[in-house]
Amino acid sequence: MIVKMGTVVVGGTKQNMSKEEILLQGKFELFPNEKSFYNVELRRTGITYYPVDGVKTNKSVKYLHFGDVIGCRCRKSLDQKHASKAYLTIFAYPLRKKLFSEKYVRFKNHVTFARNFDSTFDGNRKVVEQWRRVILHLCRQLPVHKKDVEKCSVPAKTKFLVLVNPHSGPGKAMQIYQKQVAPMLDEADIQVKLIQTDHAGHGMEMMKSINRTDYHGVVIVSGDGLIYEVINGLMSRVDWEDAIKLPIGCLPGGSGNALSCAINYSAGESVETDAVLHSTFILIKHRIIPMDLVLIQQPHQQVYSFLSVCWGLLADIDYESEKFRAIGEARFTLQAIRRILSLRKYRGKLSFLPVSEYIPKSSINNNSKIVNMSGRNRRVSLQSMENIEDHDDTQDVKVRSKSVPTHLHRGISESIDNEEMFEEQLTDIRESLPSNEFNPGNMSLEDSTENKRPEFSLSTEEMEISDDRNKSSVTMSNSVNSLQEVLKLSKTSNGEVPTMLPSLDDQLPDNWVTLEDDFVTICATYQTHLGSDVIMAPDARFSDGLIHLCIVRNGIQKTELIQIMGMLEKGSHVDHPSPFVELVKVLAFRLEPETSDSIIMVDGEKVDSTSLQAQVLPGLAKLMAIQ
């Protein structure tokens, strides 16, 4: 990290602070060392502060990037000796390198400035409130121009419906919410209506009757099961095409937290360390992005999936590990070992519509070069940041959830424990907004263009295919376009979800591929993760319009299977040379089990073990995430 002449170097990317217009500047005391005065400068990307009587060096200059700030608050002292002072606390969660690791994790860093240049509290508070309003705009990526600083108002508050399943996984979801999530939502001044689910299907029941305009989004603190209920509840409504536009957020509270892991992974945030903090940070800083759903049809039911369809080994592991739910995610590892040692085979027929010409892996010369992608970072790096060195001050600066190296963030104290001790000396000043200031209909810029027809959006630009795979990239893009043509991006005349699938009893079109064989497992997934240590489809995107099929045929050795299971942690199984393992990108598939006692799991929920067919619905749902 180098600070020289106002230039901040972040992870190899230069930020020229001197070229940024200063929106506000002033002198403040730095709490709790209130005899120390600092020059504080507020720009569009962050706040710089340094001692008034000091020299600017890399040790004296402190910096808070608005990509790390979730909120701020005006406060007053409980000590009458400081009754005239007004305090501004900024709630930030910057990154620092994890001990004995190259990975970065977020930590709590609350910085408090004190204003005492006016003889009255109201005079000091007026200045602090102006800073607060501008900071709230900038940390939410709302544009602020210097000429508008004086009349900048408090942004409208966000309101979430939060559903907590207290029985999910180890049964700690409510404890997780109260101790870790709620305090951060409070710092971001997000309003919450909290509901605990008390029986299976409760989430689906609520979604059938919820008024979408009452909330900016619904947040699930649970495992993946409650997300499944919420999505199917929204899709079962008469007004499903509007209801499914209600943004969905999720926080890890169960034993299977696949979507939460995928969201963290996509944002470049930690999946393994303090996942709740990172997930809550993303929720607060989110953008509304499209997410694919998959329509699943069986003889006696039709459901909508957001995660996966598993049959065979992976389904057995998921279902049979239910009795170990109390031990959390470790249940899957335990059951995987038991099931591999007594490996089963499953007879069935798998048919699919591939995105490009299908060439069986067994027909390829296995001595051909295997491209090793295990070390490639397939998501945004936490150590990178947009280069805003030469940005135009008149344009809004896009702030991502990145941060500068740790030592520039330590403002109040080098000890978080000390910070929490001194926090007890201050109390918050809440600004009560008139009820008409909260407009749930004004959800986001993305929602302003919504109409009454279903949206099937495909983000082909999000497919980060490497240069050595240009050919497959072109083929994939063409397949996505063909799917758009099939769906025609509109609803059918009878209000049903448009589908390209024939009846389950009908013969499939000639452009489908059919495999009839003995299988170990088949897994269709549309998210990167199936768990925190299972990256099943590392190149998946939330709205890539694709189903990623993992096929493992009978004949694979147990030692190979154990090796592949170990490779799932990094997603490197995609390059395994075994002819018994294939990964195919498809638009639709049909599964016809012939093994009578086999299990099928959809999003971690057991469904009928009968014929099943599925089709991707590109970008139908809305997700609160960063991509």
Image (tube, rainbow, N blue to C red):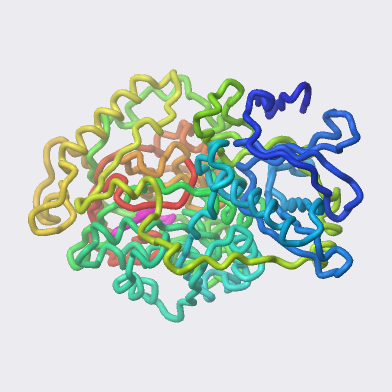
Q: Is 313 in the magenta?
A: yes
Task: Pick the quarter of the image with the N terminus.
Answer: top right
Horizontal arrangement in the rendering, residue 583 relative to residue 300 (left or right)? right
Q: Is residue 502 above or below residue 39?
A: below
Q: Is residue 497 above or below residue 538?
A: below
Nearer-the-camera pick, 169 or 218: 218
Horizontal arrangement in the rendering, residue 221 relative to residue 304 (left or right)? right
Q: Is 235 in the magenta?
A: no
Residue name at image x 52 percent, y 35 percent? 398
Nearer-the-camera pick, 155 or 376: 155
Q: Main secondary structure of the magenta part?
A: strand
| Rendered location of residue 225, percent (x, y) | 43, 66
| Rendered location of residue 159, percent (x, y) | 47, 64
Nearer-the-camera pick, 92 or 319: 92
- Can residue 261 be seen here? yes
- Can residue 103 be seen here? no
Q: Which residues are magenta?
A: 304-314
